[in-house]
Amino acid sequence: MRLKEANEAANKVFKACVDFDKSTPELLAAVSEYLATLEPTMLRRVTTLKEGILLKTKFLPTVADFHALVKELEAKDTQFKPHTHYKVLESYDVEQPPLERRKQVVMDALGYNPQDRKSKPMEAEYAMPLDPKIVEAVTASYDAAMARKKSA
């Protein structure tokens, strides 16, 4: 069954070539035997007009041409696959606490309600007051910068 499909695919490819009359039965048989070893999906990809052998060669394709194209397509397929053997963690059905409880935990941790657009994080009860010396230094620096800007 596979040899029949491979032979039909090889005939289709060879008939699409410009120098079809120069092909030999031995070349067609060798290509058919090689195509019979491929998986059906790869056989379709190698013989399509979109990414097949007819785009890669100007003359009659040989077994080496088909083999190079198969290796190229396999490399393209595995290009973005991870090269590690880590398994993806599966999500388990863990019962979540009620929504009101989760909201309360967030509010306790942050000190404010993140859904309330009017409340700001600095107005939270957990915000620490600044040292007065730091406030004086920042104000003095700002005042000096503004004075230089006015005099310039």
Image (cartoon, rainbow, N blue to C red):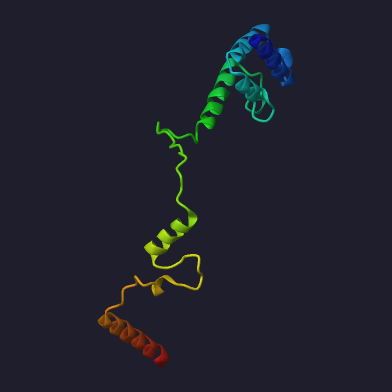
Residue 7 left/right relative to 107: right
Say which quadrant the C terminus sits in. bottom left
Q: Nearer the viewer, residue 77 or 118?
A: 118
Residue found 39% across the figure and 88% down from its top:
146
* Side of 35 where 22 appears, left or right: right
Camera-side residue of 122 and 87: 122
Horizontal side, residue 124 vs residue 64: left or right: left
Judge whether 66 appears above or below 92 on screen. Answer: above
Figure label count? 0
Instruction: Depth check: give the residue in front, 129 or 138.
Output: 129
> Where does residue 81 sit, x and y in percent of width and height?
48, 34
Q: Which of the 4 image quarters holds residue 64?
A: top right
Name the residue: 61% across, 16% down: 62
Across and down, in percent, residue 29 comes to 64, 8
Q: Quadrant of residue 39?
A: top right
Does 43 appear above or below 148? Answer: above
Q: Please give the name of the residue rendered at 63% of the width and 25% of the height, measured from the top-left corner.
A: 45
**Where residue 50 sits: x, y (%)?**
67, 30
Query: In which image quadrant can residue 10 be found?
Result: top right
User: What residue do we see at 54% from left, 32% from top?
Assistant: 76
In the image, farthest residue toward the top: 26
Q: Position of residue 44 (x, y in %)?
A: 65, 22
- 46 with respect to 110 (left or right): right
